[in-house]
Image (cartoon, helix red, strand yellow):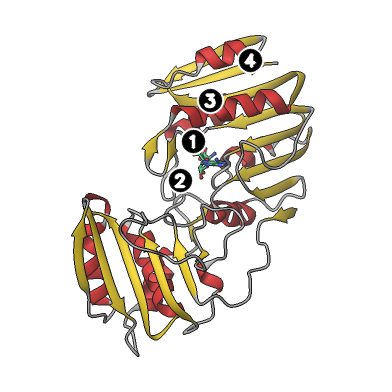
Amino acid sequence: MSSETHPVPPAVPAAVVYGTPSPELVEAGADAVQTSPLVPGSTALEDLAPQSLERAVIAAPPGTLERRYVEALALRALKPGGELVVLAPKDRGGARMKGELTGFGCEVEETGRRHQRICRVLRPAVPEGLDAAITAGGPQRLDRIELWTQPGVFSWDRPDPGTELLIRNLPVLAGAGADLGCGLGQIARAVLASPAVTELTLVDIDRRAIDAAKRNLTDPRARLVWGDGRGTPELSGLDFVVMNPPFHEAGVESRGLGIAFITRAAAILRKGGVLWLVANRHLPYEESLTRLFSRVTPVRDAGGFKVYEARR
Ligand SMILES: C[S@@+](CC[C@H](N)C(=O)[O-])C[C@H]1O[C@@H](n2cnc3c(N)ncnc32)[C@H](O)[C@@H]1O
């Protein structure tokens, strides 16, 4: 299995940022190194040396386990006395941050602006409970779903019903293909059950998903790429594409993202190649499918999801 996931991190940074905090609320600083797993090529917070950072600014994710994990990693990486600023919308985890940081042994100065909570702390000499939070939010194998996974990844602790519907309706595929937005790799696992599949490129913008998928797929035909599936990696002449395309960007519904995935699938398939797609039934993908593909077959409509076969 090849991987193109972890570029070498830069020399030890003094300051980091996680995500894209509004500069009107807090300045991350021009030299701050990006550490979000959703930004391909970024440095992993996990890789930072303990007690090495002067400052960290975190646009905190909404999930509790994921947010506490990021807070704990940032505190581990900060020097004693280093500054941590964490901000999030009040109704998307912001209201819980002060309690979480207090629980890590920090004295918290909390302010509010534009529906966001902003917490500032100076890293205590001996923070409390970091290891437990890092374990709870870190990579883990869940026996219940029989997968390696991590809080924050799409549908990280339960199978997505759309994904399951697609897997139940997939034919036995053959040749070279791609899984755009592969997540933990469940669809890919079903595809690779066919010995006629010669290679499968999996792409996801979430490094944690790619890292988990690497552990879930130990098949030499799988190539895993951390990148934006709308353009990465270069692919052409494929026999098939499978996908359960994303329709949220930065937590907001984005139909354009799903349509961009369909457009990309059409561009990388050979003439006669086939796209297998599942989507929430309310999403308006038919127009793009019929415009870009020569034959579109709605294969299944169940449980709020639709499965399509679209032939180039
Ligand atoms: C609906 S989930 C499907 C995940 C997996 N295929 C499944 O069926 O469980 C969409 C996936 O697309 C990924 N994603 C979102 N935007 C992306 C982008 N621009 N490029 C590549 N992957 C992206 C998300 O991280 C997520 O894993």
- Name the residue type under label 1: Pro
Q: Is mark 1 within 8 Å of ligand 1?
A: yes
- Is residue 189 rendered to the left or right of residue 255? right
**CB under 8 Å between discs 4 and 2:** no
Quadrant of the drawing holding the C terminus: top right
Q: Residue at x 47, y 49 (%)?
A: 145
- Is residue 157 rendered to the left or right of residue 25? right
Label 3, label 1: how far apart the Cα atoms are: 10 Å
Residue 304 image offset from top left, x and y in percent: 38, 23
Q: Is mark 2 within 8 Å of ligand 1?
A: yes
Q: Is any atom of residue 20 visible in this view? A: yes
Earlier sequence position, callout 3 versus callout 2: 2
Residue 246 numbered tag? 1
**Position above or below: 230 against 97:** above
Earlier sequence position, callout 4 versus callout 1: 1
- Is residue 145 rendered to the left or right of residue 220? left
Q: Secondary structure at mark 3?
A: helix
**Position above or below: 303 against 186:** above
Give the residue pinned by disc 3.
Answer: 259
- Name the residue type under label 2: Phe
Label 1, label 2: how far apart the Cα atoms are: 9 Å
Q: Residue at x 35, y 73 (%)?
A: 84
How busy is the neighbourhood of tag 3: few (under 14 within 10 Å), some, or many (20 plus)? many
Nearer to me, 310 or 169? 310
Single out the mark in the foreground, 3 or 2. 3
Give the residue pinned by disc 2.
Answer: 154
Q: Residue at x 68, y 67 (%)?
A: 8
Residue 71 image offset from top left, x and y in percent: 37, 69
Q: Secondary structure at mark 1?
A: loop
Earlier sequence position, callout 3 versus callout 1: 1
